[in-house]
Amino acid sequence: MELIDTHAHLTYKGLMESLEAVLSRSTQVGITKCITIGTDAEHNEKVISIVEKHPNLYAVLGIHPHHASQFAPADLQRLKELTKHEKVVALGETGLDFHYNFSKPDAQKDLFKTFLEISSEKKLPIIIHTRDAFDETMEIIDKFADKNTKIVFHCWGGTVQQTKIVLDRGFYISFTGIVTFKNAEQSRDTAKIVPLERMMIETDSPFMSPEPMRKQKINEPALLIHTAAKIAELKQMPLEIFASEVTKTTKQFFNLP
């Protein structure tokens, strides 16, 4: 069985200092590749440093909307330079977070627009973070995204109606361990209607360990197996077939070998 963790923060505390052990545990359960995500200038550099050392790791470069009010213009220029690296497979995460509003909404919107422009210029897929900002996120995508850009909404928490809107646009949806949580009926309802050719899965580690590992404070790629098993159950299909199909979708989206 082969699975790919499409969204992990391996450069974050709790994972980076024990990366070899983390990756060893993931391969033991069939996680053959992992995509590690940058969220600011410092972590973009770290992401590049670790993917160069590990053949099964790939990089995504971004500035999280939380940091939209603090980044320097030079950070974007450096990010553009780093996109030339052969193991950079997408941009993000980027988008809007009006739940915490750690950065001003206008700053988030401006940065989001810039990332959509860069993704078009570099012909790279883009990973979207949206929280309490679905309508505004879709409005910006509709106005500023290149029609040929592949888009995935990560850590999906939208309603069934919002899910249908995303799918109607031809975009992709990625699910985390939230789908295993006892009070997450909405997440399970949306997972049921997303076709496998538009679905990916992720840990978003080190956050949100899935059931039955919720007491494990630091999530890691090896725990992706629990999310996969839950969605396979919801789809009423064998785990091995689910894994094969969702992995095929992931490889096509990120152009992975």
Image (cartoon, rainbow, N blue to C red):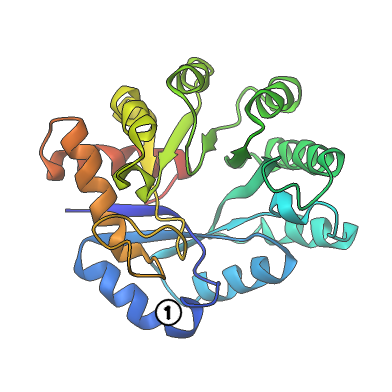
Q: How dense is the environment of label 1, judged by Cα within 10 Å: few (below 14), some, or many (20 and up)? A: some
Quarter holding residue 33:
bottom left
Q: Is residue 124 left or right of residue 51?
A: right
Residue 232: percent from left, percent from top: 19, 38
User: What residue appears at the point 13 percent right and 45 percent down from the top-left corner?
Assistant: 240
Q: Is residue 204 left or right of residue 223?
A: right
Query: Which residue lies under the disc numbered 1?
Result: 19
- 152 is higher (above) or lower (below) than 141: below
Q: Which residue is painted at 39% across and 47% down in the image?
A: 176
Seen as rendered, the residue at the extreme left is: 238
Q: In this rendering, would 37 be left or right of 238?
A: right
Q: Locate residue 87, reporting x and y percent.
A: 53, 60
- Residue 131 placed where, x, y %? 61, 39
Secondary structure of residue under mark 1: helix
> From what the image shows, is residue 54 above or below residue 94?
below
Amino acid tagged 1: Leu
Measuring from the top left, give residue 19's x and y in whole percent. 42, 79
Residue at image coords 80%, 41%? 114
How many numbered circles are shown? 1
Residue at the location (34% across, 29% down)? 197
Farthest-out residue, front: 183
State the residue in front, 194 or 251: 194
Residue sitting farthest toward the bottom: 17
